[in-house]
Image (cartoon, rainbow, N blue to C red):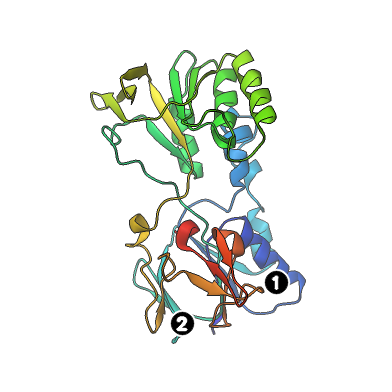
Amino acid sequence: MAGIIIVGAGQAAVQAAASLRQEGCKDEITIFGDEPWLPYQRPLLSKQYLLGTETEEQIYQRAEKFYEDQRVVLRLGERIESIDVAAKTVTSAKGEVIPYKELLLATGSRPRILKIQGSELSGIHYLRTLGDVNAIKNEMAPGKRLVIIGGGYIGLEVASVAVTLGLDVTVLEMEERILKRVTTAEMSEFYHQLHAGRGVKILLRTAVSGFEGDGHITHVLCGDQRIAADMVEMPMRVDDVADRQPRFGGMTQNRLRVSGVAAGVHHDPATRTKQHHAVAIRLLAGHERTTQQVQIRGDGFE
């Protein structure tokens, strides 16, 4: 019997499932997530979990018993490839076609992958998933030289954890101040001095042009400058659309493939798409308001 399918296993997905049950929904609810872990709190990855003050189980959004008690089926490690809105079905990466009564899109975003000289070297890490942070934790050790690309909140959180653990930390920021996109100049200066006072080296107006190493990262290139590095961490920035096209294409007559900027996922202020049995979480990506609709771009879709 077709029920409610939620594509994505992040905080929005879990809260949606909980809210549906709280509102008395009796339909079968199934959450699809392409990661193998129980849904967890991503904000804690770059702080308590990376530092080691909280365990994997402690960052789970809900205990496994919650899903059993609320009759929410978790299909973890399973990615949805496409959605057929005419047939009201989703197709998994394994080719399984699953019917739905109502559909919720809560896929979140994925990191932008740099494609510059040496970007394939080992020791270069992106931070989005639990697996990403486990890899970073396994490589961290006192005295290691960590270069963090980007002086935003996540980058500075990682810097704080790393310097606490005894690493030699350098933050590279291409703007004239850290946190420029999110706060005032006064607050930027406050946090700059706070981190510098703890031993973090912050280089402003410094853009990365490439990486060097013999299989493993040894230097970050910034024009004529070479910065020694044993590991590099790049906080998550939303990927561009072109690289997501293999996962989800544009919108065709009968299929909704939520990726392309041109197509996007159009929905009304209640987040309902033109197919009212399909709803998109607004925080998936940036949106453009018009007098008639909200357009969700593909900036945040996996």
Question: Who comes first in sequence, dot 1 or dot 2?
Answer: 1
Q: Quadrant of the N terminus?
A: bottom right
Which residue is depicted at the point 56% across and 77% down?
Answer: 273
Q: Is residue 111 visible?
A: yes
Residue type of the residue flagged with mark 2:
Val
Tag on residue 104? none
Q: Residue 132: where, in percent of width, then height? A: 46, 40
Which residue is depicted at the point 54% across and 58% down?
Answer: 285
Q: Is residue 4 visible?
A: no
- CB contact under 8 Å: marks 1 and 2: no
In this rendering, the answer to whether 224 lies above or below 251 is above
Secondary structure beneath disc 2?
loop
Whether residue 210 sits left or right of residue 148 in the image: it is: left
Q: Residue 9: where, in percent of width, then height? A: 55, 59
Q: Residue 103: where, in percent of width, then height? A: 55, 75
Residue tagged 2? 85
Q: Residue 30: where, in percent of width, then height? A: 56, 70
Residue 186 placement: quadrant: top right
Whether residue 22 sits left or right of residue 191 in the image: it is: right
Residue type of the residue flagged with mark 1:
Leu
Q: Residues within 10 Å of mark 1 (few under 14, many from 20)?
A: some
Whether residue 10 sits left or right of residue 245 in the image: it is: right
Residue tagged 1? 20
Q: Quadrant of the C terminus?
A: bottom left
Which residue is depicted at the point 49% across and 33% down?
Answer: 150
Which residue is depicted at the point 42% across and 51% down?
Answer: 239
Q: Nearer the viewer, residue 169 or 296?
A: 296
Which is closer to the viewer, label 1 or label 2? 2
In this rendering, the answer to whether 240 lies above or below 295 is above
